[in-house]
Image (cartoon, rainbow, N blue to C red):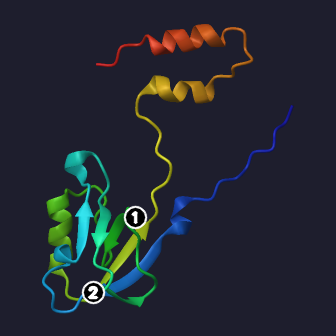
Amino acid sequence: MSRTLKKKKHWSGKVVECAVSWGNLGDFGSVVEVLGGAELGQFPHLGQMKLDVLVCHVGKLPYYGDVLLEVNGTPVSGLTNRDTLAVIRHFREPVRLKTVKPGESRSTYPSNNITLILNPTVPCHSKQTINHSNTVVP
């Protein structure tokens, strides 16, 4: 009855670091859009970028949607969007960014995830699904 479990790689192995500059074209926010933030219940992540202006000195340029983890060694996960931009503005060019591609996100509503756990071959599966779909979330 033993099953071989597939070992998943930890997300920290997928962290990408790069050093970027953007010349004399204003602040970082005018070249790279920073989205998300704690006020929205999200990690800060990168939006539209002016790729013709950004220069990558070390590493490779991040992609649209990448989660922003650190700016020059300062963690920004859990900060509001405004605070994240303030941290970026605090440093001079080039700025070192640590990013990671976002993983799969599961719904926060329990009944959507419970069917992933329950085994449909068990006789009481249909009753379990009904009971969980009738739960009231405050």
Residue at 62% in and 59% down? 9
Q: Could you say where residue 43 lies in the image, as x and y percent from the top left?
A: 32, 55
Q: What element carries label 1?
A: loop
Q: Is mark 2 on a helix, strand or loop?
A: loop
Query: Considering the image in quadrants, where does the N terminus appear?
Result: top right
Mark 2 residue crowding within 10 angstroms, few (<14) / some (14–19) / many (20+) = some
Identify which residue, 62 or 18, lies in the foreground.
62
Residue type marked 2: Val
Residue type marked 1: Asp
What label sits on residue 53 in the rendered view?
2
Residue at 81% in and 38% down? 3
Q: Could you say where residue 135 lies in the image, as x and y percent from the top left?
A: 41, 13
Q: Is residue 85 above or below residue 128?
A: below
Mark 1 residue crowding within 10 angstroms, few (<14) / some (14–19) / many (20+) = many
- Looking at the image, residue 64 sits to the left or right of residue 7; the answer is left
What label sits on residue 66 in the rendered view?
1
